Amino acid sequence: MIRNSDIDGYSRFSILVHWITAFLIVLLFVTHEGDQGDLAYYIHVSFGAIAGLFLIWRVSYRFRKGMSKKPDQSPVLNLLSAIVIYGFLVCILVVILTGYLLPWSMGQPIDFMGLFAIPSPIPQSEGLYEFTEELHEISGQAFIPLLILHVLGVAKHVFIDRDGIATRMTRASKSGI
């Protein structure tokens, strides 16, 4: 469980990590339908393998550092916010871990942009491949409703509440986490 802090903001580093994560997820999402051999596929697989290391670190970083103080809003909205945040973190982990398992379940190495490859530590398994591919797709598609809810939450804080919560990811706090 991610602890909530009494600190009302994020550090420059946390904000930078947030936006890098958002960029990587969008990049990997828009390249996920590439056919084997084309540029989108190459970017998704090769860059995803490297970006996955950063994204796994990012999830663990958030669990270690916690979240900033909850906004002054109804408990239902705070619960919905927590569901969205946890949903993002779970989806990131599932997409990355299944992304690593996909080539391995076919007995193939993970190729890091042609620089090096990590051979499969498991035997080839068509059943595992099919299960992993389905889980990878479902968890990847789950980003869409989560992102919509996230953007709606930001819009609520900017246009309805006008409480400055949205500036947490644009303006660093000196005591931010």
Image (cartoon, rainbow, N blue to C red):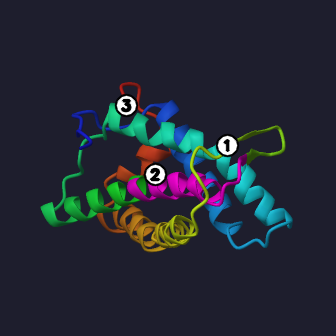
Q: Earlier in the sequence, mark 2 or mark 1?
A: 1
Q: Is residue 122 magenta?
A: no
Q: CA distance from mark 3 to mark 2?
A: 22 Å
155 relative to 175, above or below: below
Q: Which residue is labeled 1 in the image?
A: 50
Residue type at mark 3: give it. Ile
Residue at horizontal 85 percent and vertical 63 percent from the top? 39
Residue at horizontal 52 percent and vertical 70 percent from the top? 127
Total number of numbered labels? Answer: 3
Residue type at mark 1: give it. Ile
SS at circle 3: loop
Nearer-the-camera pick, 69 or 156:
69
SS at circle 2: helix
Q: Which residue is labeled 2 in the image?
A: 93
Instruction: Give residue 68's position: percent from left, percent from top.
Output: 30, 40
Residue at horizontal 86 percent and vertical 67 percent from the top? 38
Within-10-Å neighbours for mark 2: few <14, some 14–19, many 20+:
many
Instruction: Give residue 165's position: percent from left, percent from top.
Output: 35, 51
Please report contact status of discs 3 and 1: CB closer than 8 Å, yes or no. Answer: no
Please report contact status of discs 3 and 2: CB closer than 8 Å, yes or no. Answer: no
Q: Which residue is labeled 3 in the image?
A: 177
Q: Which mark is residue 139?
A: none
Q: Predominant secondary structure in magenta?
A: helix
13 relative to 85, above or below: above
Q: Which residue lies most toward the top here?
A: 175
Residue type at mark 2: give it. Leu
Within-10-Å neighbours for mark 1: few <14, some 14–19, many 20+:
some
Instruction: Give residue 61's position: percent from left, percent from top.
Output: 42, 34
Q: CA distance from mark 2 to mark 1?
A: 14 Å
Instruction: Give residue 95's position: percent from left, percent from top.
Output: 52, 58
SS at circle 1: helix
- In the visual, does 164 lie left or right of 147? left
